[in-house]
Amino acid sequence: MKVELQNLTKIFPSRSKKAGEEVIAVNDFTFTIPDGKLIGLLGPSGCGKSTTLYMISGLQKPTSGKIFFGDDDVTELSPENRGVGLVFQNYALYPHMTVKQNILFPLQNLKGEDKMTKEEMLEKAIWAAKLVQIDNLMERKPSELSGGQQQRVAIARALVKVPKVLLLDEPLSNLDARLRLQTREEIRRIQRDTGITTIFVTHDQEEAMSISDMIVVMKLGVLQQIGAPQEVYDDPTNLFVAKFLGTPPINVFSGKVQGGKLYIGGEDVLDVGGVSDCEVTVGIRPEGFIPNENGRFSCDLSSVEVMGRDVSIVSRHENSLNPIIRSIVDADNKIDMSAAKVKYDLKPHKVLLFNKETEERIYFEVK
């Protein structure tokens, strides 16, 4: 099911009647979610991603704008009539019911033409349980399950009605690191098996990038960028997106372009064509450094962290806007730990320039 959001805006009134201002949680959000895709809604806390999800589900009403499922305008439709499945961050399972009863519950509330027999409901519940691999836990209660198993029950309950759209609100944040990894892989598998259009809300950029067909980056209720995860990582539209995506984060410096060369401090570190002389903010991805004793860019060496196949070089620079600079290089590179300086050449496609005032991207030609 294609989901289309047209100029979607949500404004919350001020809590203070005297001097408070209205809060614009989502501001003029327009986006089309293709049928059968998994979309990651990504951004820091307070950016409006959960509010967007709740407007799609019908739990919150937009201040203005439209929501379409396919060709149908569902903006005024009640949540139970939208055909959505919603999985909350805290699972929201009924503690007094077994796994089977929790999964059956949405089917037992169906009325009219959609009403099912007990046999049909049980068949559906078993199908959903097998899909998330908990069919051997049907008689247990939530208190007898691990966090990961409870999350699977919540997903099965959302899937049992075969919704048009599956909505996941930070479903992995309560799980430990290993369980998060396993469960996100399961979500990707389930989505591919069912072909249900899925919207996945998270503040964890690694989660979003690893399982999404497309990611939508938000900041303070405003859409920043949409695209395939790798495309957005490689080609961010502004400094916020560049800094938000990437682990370790991008290294940021103050610099300037002069005579077709990029300067950081007193060193011309890269030739950049097609850019007028100006002060810039420079972003260099951790993988964008090439150790070279005759390199054009030098930093003060702090330490070297061995990570197996890679090495993380920690350094500092007076023009760095980060506390430290982290460079990820192949472990075959031998770094002289007794040296005060480490020198690099830079990979041009891993160097990003931004307007110092607007923070918008400045593109350059590689000479």
Image: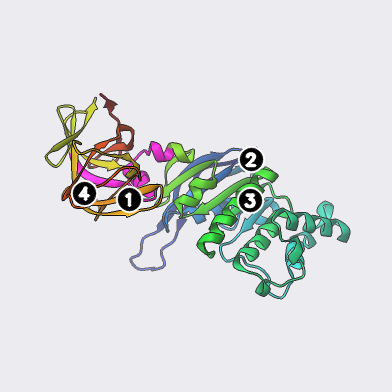
Task: Kindly identify the amino acid type of the residue bearing the numbered disc 2.
Answer: Gly
**In the rendered structure, which amino acid carries the disc numbered 4?**
Ser
The region drawn magenta spans: 232-255
Q: For the image shown, how many numbered marks are present on the structure?
A: 4
**Residue at 66 percent of width and 68 percent of height:** 93
Color scheme of the displayed model: rainbow
- In this figure, which residue is indicated by the disc labeled 2? 36
Q: Quadrant of residue 352?
A: top left
Q: SS at mark 2?
A: loop
Tell me the distance, in whole angstroms, between the alpha carbons under discs 3 and 4. 43 Å
The type of residue carrying mark 3 is: Leu
Label 1, on which residue?
312
Of labels 3 and 4, earlier in sequence is: 3
For mark 4, what is the residue?
320
Determine if residue 347 is in view.
yes
**Mark 1 vs 4, N-terminal side:** 1
Residue at image mark 3: 166
Which residue is located at x 20 percent, y 51 percent? Answer: 301
Which circle, 3 or 4, is nearer the viewer?
4
